[in-house]
Image (cartoon, rainbow, N blue to C red):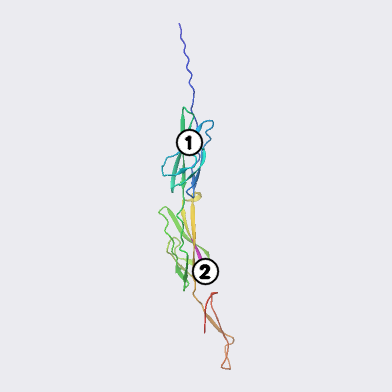
Amino acid sequence: CKSVAEVIITNHALSVSAGRDVVTCTNDGVLKASDPAPYTGSWSEVTDFGSKIEDPTSFETKVTNLVVGGNTFRWTRTNGVCSVSDDVTITCNKPTQANAGGTQSSCFDYGTLHANTPDVDEFGWWSPLGGQGLIADSTDVNTRVTGLGGGMNTFIWNIRRGDGDNACVSTDTATVNSNKLQISVTASQPEYCTPEGEVFGTVNVDEYESFW
């Protein structure tokens, strides 16, 4: 004699992808997971830093209030019987807002720049923009500049977080107005046979007040 019984095993296994890890230079980002259709999916925050997911049930949605560093999110796909998840990380490399110190004036051909200090995981440096001037130490927030030209001399303070293609940079400009006067006096001729003659004076900047 033989007795036979049959059993049916239904495979409800799912596949899922939360998308590729990305880098952003702001506190916002976009989550892009695989479409869960014909089933459903939902986002949740793994790192629990207080980010706001605009639409947790949409496979592509905006996320705000990211903190600097790694922010990890989980996309879970479910068919009512089984569920499967995948994680994705958005790295926020938003740099500190650069502050180059604004505009200053100098009566000489030198001065000192004053910028804000980058965070420990950031890199800051000065670069010339316009006019003249030699930067003594491009990485010093309070560096000295020499050889300024008369009038406006402009410099950029850069703050960078991240490296290579993942670098994010914030910039601000500082202007040093050099009011140092270089005066020259010449005569219309080297010798005169009368008690009268003509002399001419020149200075190196456009706006000035002079007198004999």
Looking at the rendered image, the disc whose residue lies closer to the viewer, 1 or 2, is: 1
Q: Residue furthest bottom?
A: 194
Residue depicted at 46% across the width and 30% down the height: 83
Specify the label residue 173 is tagged with: none
The correct choice, above or below, for 204 with respect to 12 in the image is: below
The correct choice, above or below, for 78 with respect to 194 in the image is: above
For the record, the magenta segment spans 150-156
The image quadrant of residue 1 is: top left
Residue depicted at 51% across the width and 31% down the height: 39
- Kindly identify the amino acid type of the residue bearing the numbered disc 2: Met
Residue named by callout 2? 152
The correct choice, above or below, for 175 with respect to 41 in the image is: below
Nearest the viewer among 1 and 62 is 62
x and y percentages locating residue 115 in the rendered image: 44, 61
Left or right of 139: which side holds 130? right
Residue named by callout 1? 42
x and y percentages locating residue 24 in the rendered image: 49, 48
Mark 2, secondary structure of its residue: strand
Mark 2: few/some/many CA within 10 Å (<14, 14-19, 20+):
some
Residue depicted at 43% across the width and 47% down the height: 69
Mark 1, secondary structure of its residue: strand
Q: Residue furthest top?
A: 1
Q: CA distance from mark 1 to mark 2?
A: 56 Å
